[in-house]
Amino acid sequence: MKKLNFNEQDLLTEIGTIGTGHAATAMADILGQKITITVPNVELVSFNRVAEYIGAAGSNLACIYLDVLGDLPGTVVVMFTENAARRLLQIFMPDVPFSFLELSPFQQSALMEMGNILSGAYLTALADFSNQRMYLSVPRLSVDMAEASLSVPLIKLGSETDYALLIQAKFFEEFTNRGYIVYFPNPDAAARLIEIFGVGSDG
Amino acid sequence: MDNFQIGMAQLYVAKSPGRIRSTGLGSCIGIILYDPFAKVGGMAHAMLPKHRPGRGDNKAKYVDTAIEIMLEDMEALGANRMNIVAKLAGGAQMFPDSDKDSLMLIGEKNIAAAEEHLGNLGIPIVAKDVGGHSGRTLELDCRDGTLYIKTVTTETKI
């Protein structure tokens, strides 16, 4: 699989839209305000370009990693900028001082739970829409360079392929309060997604 | 001065006064080779320990094949294999709360693979900054082989 055709890209974008719409609603419920979410990008990207493609290159981010198990295995990564993490934690625990690189265990748990809720909403929508079973592992957190955290899902793909299929969207509360949600289906799961929705590879 | 930026699953070799940089190594391993006489250096940002055929064509992705390619490319730039020394950086465990998951230990496997492969080739490892839980940004100065390493909180050189 080297290049997506137009129909495949369109289909996966639609799938991503459903998922991110649900994730945005879940986040808006928690924050008590409207969340803007971008139309997802779907692309097949070589490993060295993934962080740049997501728009996260060179940034320090809080990255929540979850394995996706079931019929469409892969990885989901939810990432928050420092400002987004600060804003979220102020809602949960307003009196606790915030230091992005030295979060307390409670603050780490809160961010992981946020990643859990967002990716849960995202994948439930996708599982319902495609009538597939999908489960999430427990969340794990790393606050570090985006590229370094992304190495883990990419290494997982790397044993099978040279390219990552990524279905990703950004969500905003304000411009600086930015988050990313990215689903990396394994190569077999990507092929299955396309097959389920009946789009032939020759369009 | 020439500056080269490489990303995940890429490698590059350069002569003095070139600099080779790679941003945000996590569990990947940075393998640095340097010939101090020819002043030729190479850097690979390898993801996995060992090449297995049929799982993608990019040989820079694997520790063993990346080292082989760098050695050949460095020789083409005038390096002598007998003079080449190695430095290693990277191989962190980025998500620490997960000691039972073998994927999360891939950093350690990458470090071990690089040490083993370099050992088999008789290439001495003169310095390393590996493991831990932080990503690293690397920059190799091909004038003298110094490797500059930054994490989100620290800066060092080896």
Image: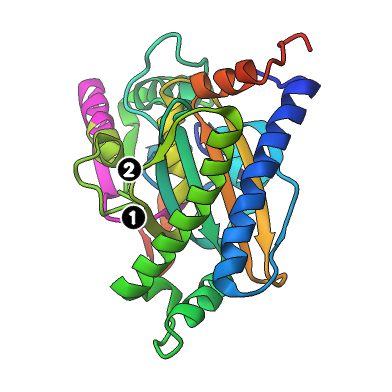
Q: Is residue A136 left or right of residue A198?
A: left
User: Residue B158: which disc?
Assistant: 1
- Residue range of the region highlighted in magenta in the rendering: B113-141
Q: Is residue A85 magenta?
A: no
Callout 2: SS: strand
- Amino acid type at circle 1 is Ile
Determine contact: label 2, label 1, CB under 8 Å: yes
Residue sitting at 52 percent across and 42 percent down? A124
Residue sitting at 50 percent across and 16 percent down? B56
Q: Does the image show residue A114?
A: yes
- Percent from the top left, x then y, of residue A15? 66, 35
Q: Is residue A105 left or right of residue A73?
A: left
* Residue B108 occupies quadrant: top left
Q: Which part of the image, by quadrant, shows the N terminus of chain A?
A: top right
Residue A179 against residue B121 in the figure, above or below? below
Crowd tier of the residue under label 2, counting other residues whose Cα lies within 10 Å: few below 14, some 14–19, many 20 or above: many
Measured in 3D between alpha carbons, the distance from the residue under mark 2 to the one under mark 1, in whole angstroms, is: 8 Å
Q: Is residue A6 left or right of residue A108?
A: right
For mark 2, what is the residue?
B87
